[in-house]
Image (cartoon, rainbow, N blue to C red):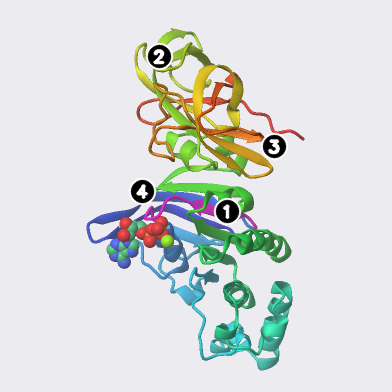
């Protein structure tokens, strides 16, 4: 278990600026999830930490040691890849023990390390099989086992669950959490999947176009996103956004009018930000779980998804249009707890819980966020 620091890390591929001044301190034993859309630089950053990629400038330390120019095998890290990268001609046992063999560890020691890792991952019965005889989930366990046997200071995971089916992914999420506790290890995990970030991270790092947008615990980021990007990226279904204008500023009270909404909405400005000017354009955010049935906004039901434990409604509210909506037609997403019987084309009245609204300025910076309290 070691800490990891990145200090102003930059990476250029020729003229392309892939990583733009990333600084981060990972505490010993943390499970950090770096999340962001495809192409934002997650793999580049992880490979740079592993030493598989040089950096253009900046500094990296692991457990106080400057690793910036150390080769991968001297960094005390082990990486697990999305595509498993197992040697097809070797047994599971030999795959898992390979790095130790290369490091000239005594045979008995290798055997013990491999068997302990196999027990932890519940793959003992597969140790003498070849990778091709295993399912995707089992192969991924072998890849994780290969990392465990090396007893690294820091584990690095690059989208290790992306090739697995949904049921196996959620099972592996739980298992990786268990493994993290059991090994008491420092882990850095990258993914494009916000669910993996929300469920596994002790802290999430949101990356966007090679830059860190925000760092915090899952609920800090969910409740208090610093930017429109973070607000839209975390949460599924995605937050609904509406463009509006500031029609009144009275101290900390901002009143926003949104075309198609029958009445303006008043929100409280966050303490640490400047009030926007009268008449400036703003973007209102409403999470699907904050949309209620009952109220003063008429909407017709365009689609119903009955999930059993919840019901998702996609609502056409006429002139009240969602921007950046998941469906390109500007429908509003409502997430209702439990089961409801609705028919396509039905008209319902909707409204929002006023204490669950978000507001951003035109540059996407936070103006208002709810003070959601987490229940004990
Ligand atoms: N070897 C490379 N040469 C040039 N550009 C690269 C190279 N590797 C990655 N990139 C570019 O850097 C950006 C970030 O890539 P990557 O780190 O793989 O993103 P992510 O893992 O977040 O999907 C992308 O635009 C990608 O095309
Ligand atoms: Mg990647």
Q: Which residue is found at the position 44% from the left and 15% from the top? A: 256
SS at circle 3? loop
Q: Nearer the viewer, mark 1 or mark 4?
A: 1
Residue 133 horizontal/vertical position (percent): 59, 85
Q: Residue furthest left?
A: 15
Say which residue label 3 marks: 338
Percent of width and height locating residue 269: 50, 18
Q: Examine the rendering and report whether any part of residue 168 can be seen.
A: yes
Q: Tell me whether the residue at label 1 lies in contact with that at label 4, contact meaning CB atoms closer than 8 angstroms.
A: no
3 and 4 marks in contact (CB < 8 Å): no
Along the line of sight, the residue nearer the viewer: 164 or 260: 260
> Which sits earlier in the primary sequence, circle 4 or circle 2?
4
Going from N to C along the chain, the mark reached first, 2 or 1, is 1
Mark sitting on residue 209: 4
Is disc 2 surrounded by few (<14), some (14 to 19) or many (20+) residues within 10 Å? many
Can residue 100 be seen at all in this image of the molecule? no
Label 2 sits on residue: 246
Quadrant position of ligand 1: bottom left
Q: What stretch of residues is rendered in magenta?
A: 29-41
Q: CA distance from mark 3 to mark 2?
A: 36 Å
- CA distance separating discs 1 and 3: 24 Å
**Sequence-earlier tag: 1 or 4:** 1
| Residue 278 lies in quadrant | top left
Q: Which of labels 3 and 2 is toward the front?
A: 3
């Amino acid at each position: 278990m070691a800490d990891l620091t990145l200090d102003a890390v930059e990476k250029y591929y020729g003229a392309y600026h892939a990583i733009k001044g990333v600084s981060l301190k990972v505490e010993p034993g943390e499970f950090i999830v770096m999340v962001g859309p495809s192409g934002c630089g997650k793999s580049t950053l992880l490979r740079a930490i592993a030493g598989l990629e040089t950096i253009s400038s900046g500094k990296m330390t692991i457990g106080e040691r400057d690793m910036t120019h150390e080769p991968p095998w001297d960094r005390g890290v082990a990486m697990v890849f999305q595509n498993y990268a197992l040697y097809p001609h070797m047994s599971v046992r030999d795959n898992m023990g390979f790095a130790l063999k290369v490091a000239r560890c005594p045979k008995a020691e290798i055997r013990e390390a491999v068997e302990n890792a196999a027990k932890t991952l519940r793959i003992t019965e597969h140790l003498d099989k070849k990778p091709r005889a295993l399912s995707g989930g089992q192969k991924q366990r072998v890849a994780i086992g290969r990392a465990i046997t090396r007893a690294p200071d820091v584990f690095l995971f690059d989208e290790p669950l992306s090739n697995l089916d949904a049921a196996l992914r959620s099972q592996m999420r739980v298992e990786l959490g268990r493994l993290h506790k059991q090994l008491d290890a420092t882990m850095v995990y990258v993914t494009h999947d916000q669910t993996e970030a929300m469920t596994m991270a002790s802290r999430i790092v949101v990356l966007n176009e090679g830059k860190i947008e925000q760092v915090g615990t899952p609920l800090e980021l969910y409740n208090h996103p610093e930017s429109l990007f973070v607000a839209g990226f975390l949460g599924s279904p995605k937050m609904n956004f509406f463009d509006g204008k500031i029609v009144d500023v009275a101290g900390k009270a901002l009143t926003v009018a949104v075309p198609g909404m029958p009445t303006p909405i008043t929100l409280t400005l966050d303490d640490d930000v400047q009030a926007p000017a009268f008449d400036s354009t703003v973007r209102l955010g409403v999470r699907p779980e904050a949309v209620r049935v009952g109220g003063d906004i008429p909407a017709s039901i365009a689609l119903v998804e009955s999930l059993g434990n919840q019901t998702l409604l996609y609502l056409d509210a006429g002139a009240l249009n969602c921007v950046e909506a998941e469906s390109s037609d500007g429908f509003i997403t409502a997430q209702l707890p439990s089961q409801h019987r609705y028919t396509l084309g039905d008209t319902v009245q909707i409204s929002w819980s006023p204490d669950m609204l978000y507001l951003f300025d035109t540059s996407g910076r936070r103006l208002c966020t709810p003070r959601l309290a987490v229940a004990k």
